[in-house]
Amino acid sequence: MPRFFFHVSNGGSIKDEQGDICDSVEQAKRHAVTIARELGHANPQTNARKNVCVTDEQGNEVFRTPI
């Protein structure tokens, strides 16, 4: 199964070094949306221009969603 990495970007970047194994790109997208939603609820005032960027094992961006 493929591993995807869920990086948080806000001008700088917080790299996901471990990643998560997902069945498909679609599952990785759903996971990214869940992460973004949880981060947004945790700190709603500071989310301007923040996002979760999903990359595959080769480092290719496969999805990006705002927080």
Image (cartoon, rainbow, N blue to C red):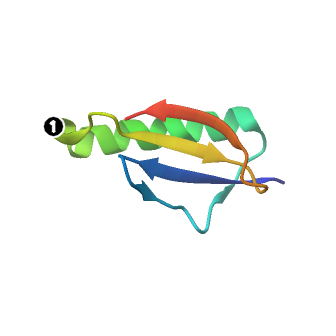
Q: What element carries label 1?
A: helix
Q: Position of residue 42 (x, y in %)?
A: 24, 46
Looking at the image, the residue that sits furthest to the right is 1
Q: Which of 48 and 20 is in front in this view?
A: 48
Residue at 33% across / 45% down in the picture? 39
Looking at the image, the residue that sits furthest to the left is 45
Q: Is residue 40 left or right of residue 64?
A: left
Residue at 65% across / 57% down in the picture? 20
Please tell me whether residue 55 is drawn above or below residue 50 in the rendered image.
below
Tell me if mark 1 has few (under 14), some (14-19) or many (20+) residues whose alpha carbon lies within 10 angstroms of its own: few
Q: Nearer the viewer, residue 45 or 27?
A: 45
Please tell me whether residue 7 is drawn above or below residue 31 in the rendered image.
below
Q: Quadrant of the N terminus?
A: bottom right
Q: How many numbered marks does the figure carry?
A: 1
Q: In this view, does 13 lie to the left or right of 29?
A: left
Looking at the image, the residue that sits furthest to the front is 11
Residue at 20% across / 44% down in the picture? 43
Residue 29, quarter of the rendered image: top right
Q: Name the residue under label 1.
A: 45
Please tell me whether residue 25 is drawn above or below residue 10 in the rendered image.
above
Looking at the rendered structure, the kind of residue marked 1 is: Gln
Please tell me whether residue 61 is drawn above or below residue 66 in the rendered image.
below
Q: Which of 22 and 44 is in front in this view?
A: 44
Looking at the image, the residue that sits furthest to the bottom is 17
Q: In this view, does 7 lie to the left or right of 66?
A: right
Q: Position of residue 65 (x, y in %)?
A: 49, 31
Q: Where is residue 30 in the image (x, y as percent from the top left)?
A: 58, 34
Q: Quadrant of the C terminus?
A: top left
Q: Is residue 45 left or right of residue 48?
A: left
